[in-house]
Amino acid sequence: MGFILGIAGVVAGLAAVSSPFIAYGMYRDGNTTAALKAAAVFIASVLIILAVPKEKGGPHRYEDCTRYSSFADDC
């Protein structure tokens, strides 16, 4: 499930980057309904990006190790 949400996050990121430019171009052309739809795509894509779970870092490498110096450790 995380893989699917990750792909959805990437696609939503691409839409979040491109849709404001598309909306602005449509607004300048006078097509306000299409500009509002592009703005709605931007808002929906930002919500998807916020909903995708972020990966948490795994355990640190040196949690169970004894470090003797910057080059020597006992794991």
Image (cartoon, helix red, strand yellow):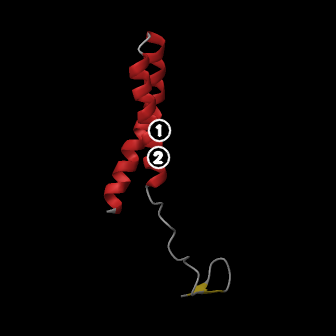
Q: Helix or strand or loop: what does disc 1 sit on?
A: helix
Q: Dot 1 corresponds to which residue?
A: 43
Three-letter amino acid code at the position of disc 1: Ile
Residue 3, relative to residue 22: is it above or below? below
Q: Which mark, by number, is residue 20?
A: none
Residue 27, relative to residue 45: is it above or below? above
Give the residue drawn at x 35%, y 62%. Answer: 2
Q: Quadrant of the C terminus?
A: bottom right
Q: Quadrant of residue 65?
A: bottom right
Q: Residues within 10 Å of mark 2 (few under 14, many from 20)?
A: some
Residue 30's x, y, as percent? 44, 11
Give the residue drawn at x 44%, y 17%. Answer: 32
Residue 68, relative to residue 1: is it above or below? below
Q: Are marks 2 and 1 in contact (CB under 8 Å)?
A: yes
Give the residue drawn at x 68%, y 81%. Answer: 69
Q: Dot 2 corresponds to which residue?
A: 47
Q: Residues within 10 Å of mark 1 (few under 14, many from 20)?
A: some
50 vs 72, left or right, is left
Residue 70's x, y, as percent? 66, 77
Residue 52's x, y, as percent? 43, 55
Q: Residue furthest right?
A: 69
